[in-house]
Image (tube, rainbow, N blue to C red):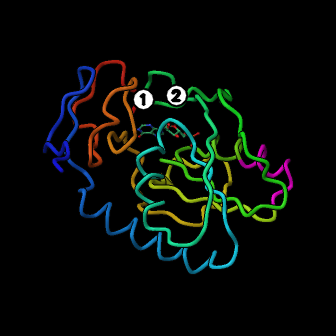
Amino acid sequence: MSFYTPDTVDCNGETFKLFISKEQIEQRINEIGQQINADYADKMPIFIGVLNGSFIFLADLMRHVSIPCEVDFFKLSSYGDEKVSSGKVTKLKDLDAQIEGRHVIIVEDIVDTGLSMSYILKQIKASSPASVKVVTLLHKPGAGKYDVKLDYVAFEIPTLFVLGYGLDYAQEGRNLAQIYVLESKSDDSKL
Ligand code: IMP
């Protein structure tokens, strides 16, 4: 299989350079998958993917999970087409599954300010699950404004704008098989 893995990429007028390689991503996902297998050995967890950004991470992570499990999706919108958070979260799709009494694992692409995750946690906890844990591919600890507990973090990164492996810039770039960081800055960039 040939994956899309350039060293630099132009996306919507900005240049991004390689930041986290495919091999690094695969290694951390394998490690987290094994951890989840051990932690949930007899629990039949349900993974809740946060759309759109988590779809590639979730798909790869689930293929390292060898215990019985289910999956459902929750869709949010918070960034619009910008590189900084709008500070507002809108729910675009609710869960289909009943999660009362279930062991829930929320799967997110990136926790930046924590606004989206605190919103999701509140929604999920209102349905009385047996337990809730959070797994995120990326975490920007420097951007944290909301206090959210992250149980599995693949990579902690500085407060930079990143692209690829499910993460977009104005909806483009999700198909990149690695993670890239913004190199050039346009005039309207606030980063
Ligand atoms: P938060 O609510 O500020 O934590 O932002 C979470 C959401 O913002 C993520 O699910 C992403 O969709 C988006 N996001 C945050 N940082 C980035 C980034 O560096 N690149 C692309 N999307 C990002």
Residue 30 lies in quadrant: bottom left
In the rendered view, would you say 45 is above or below 49? below
Q: Are marks 2 and 1 in contact (CB under 8 Å)?
A: yes
Residue range in magenta is: 121-129
Q: Quadrant of the C terminus?
A: top left
Report whether 11 appears left or right of 56. left
Count the marks: 2
Residue at x-position 23% and y-position 56%: 21
Q: Is mark 1 within 8 Å of ligand 1?
A: yes
Q: Which residue is located at x 76 percent, y 48 percent?
A: 124
Residue at the (49%, 52%) spot, across then down: 142
Q: Give the side of residue 66 with respect to residue 69, left or right.
A: left
Q: Which residue type carries mark 1? A: Lys
Q: Mark 2 vs ligand 1: CB under 8 Å?
A: yes
Q: Quick check: is 185 in the magenta stretch?
A: no
Query: Is residue 72 shown above or below 171?
Result: below
Residue 29 coordinates in the image, percent (x, y): 40, 65
| Residue under numbered circle 2 | 79
In magenta stretch: residue 127: yes
| Residue 160 rendering spot, x and y as whole percentages | 37, 43
For the residue carrying disc 2, how many other residues have a C-alpha within 10 Å: few (<14), some (14-19), or many (20+)? some
Name the foreground residue: 178 vs 97: 97
Report the Cα–Cα distance between label 2 and label 1.
7 Å
For disc 1, the marked residue is 83
Residue 167 at what x, y percent from top left? 40, 39
Location of residue 188 by image quarter = top left
Q: Residue 87's x, y, as percent?
A: 62, 29
Q: Amino acid at mark 2?
A: Tyr
Question: What crowding class fits label 1: few (fewer than 14 Cα within 10 Å), some (14-19), or many (20 or more)?
Answer: some
